[in-house]
Image (cartoon, helix red, strand yellow):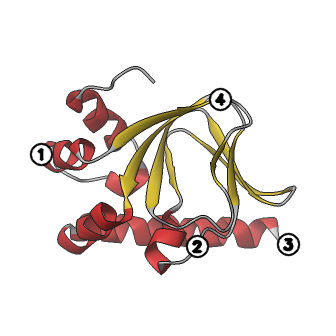
Amino acid sequence: MTHVTAADRARVLQSIPIFEGLSPIDLDVIGARMSEQSFVKGSAVFRAGDPGDAIFFLVRGTVAIRDGQRVLVKLDAPECFGELAVLSNEARSADAICESSCDVLKLKANEFNELIATRPAVQRQMMLTLVKRVREAGRRSR
């Protein structure tokens, strides 16, 4: 990933559903706390059993969340993933495998937890994101 400026990060974050409705100042603050990572196709962002120490924001590419060989969901940028392990303070329950070259922004768990504790809008959007995922999983299992 080429270095992303603070303004670019704010624009990317604004396109991710959990940050909908946040002010540009909030987005700048959040973006400044993130680190950048790039992955090649086939790489694991994390594996089942890894600590839930960060949430990831997909900037470019597609990530498959897998349970072994079974694809649970495919996520296209812009999207967040890895939040369940952070919210539950548990190890990862699945693998996150890049289906293409991917760029992600990574936010450490303690930073994310502080963010949802101090920004009710982020907390609400995270709940809506989780509800959407539960509904989609229910539709897929029918």
Give how far apart the Cα atoms at labels 1 and 3 are: 43 Å
**Camera-side mark, 3 or 4:** 4
Instruction: Residue at the far left: name it.
Output: 25
16 to 50, vertically: above or below? above
**Camera-side mark, 1 or 3:** 1
Which numbered disc, 3 or 2, marks the residue that appears first in the sequence? 2
CB-based contact (under 8 Å), mark 1 and mark 4: no
Per the image, the residue denoted by label 1 is 25
Give how far apart the Cα atoms at labels 3 and 2 are: 28 Å
| Dot 2 crowding, Cα within 10 Å, few <14, some 14–19, many 20+ | some
Q: Which residue occupies 40% across, 20% down?
A: 2
Which numbered disc, 1 or 4, marks the residue that appears first in the sequence? 1
Kind of residue at disc 1? Ile
Query: Relative to 140, is 8 on the left or the right?
Result: left
Give how far apart the Cα atoms at labels 1 and 2 are: 32 Å
| Dot 1 crowding, Cα within 10 Å, few <14, some 14–19, many 20+ | few
Query: Relative to 57, is 97 on the left or the right?
Result: right
Per the image, the residue denoted by label 2 is 91
| Dot 4 crowding, Cα within 10 Å, few <14, some 14–19, many 20+ | some
Query: Relative to 105, is 134 on the left or the right?
Result: right
Give how far apart the Cα atoms at labels 1 and 4 are: 32 Å
Q: Residue 40 bears which disc, if any?
A: 4
The image shows residue 89 at horizontal and vertical percentages of 47, 78
Q: Is mark 3 on a helix, strand or loop?
A: loop
138 to 67, vertically: above or below? below
**Camera-side mark, 1 or 2:** 2
Per the image, the residue denoted by label 3 is 142
Which numbered disc, 3 or 4, marks the residue that appears first in the sequence? 4
| Dot 3 crowding, Cα within 10 Å, few <14, some 14–19, many 20+ | few
The image shows residue 46 at horizontal and vertical percentages of 61, 53
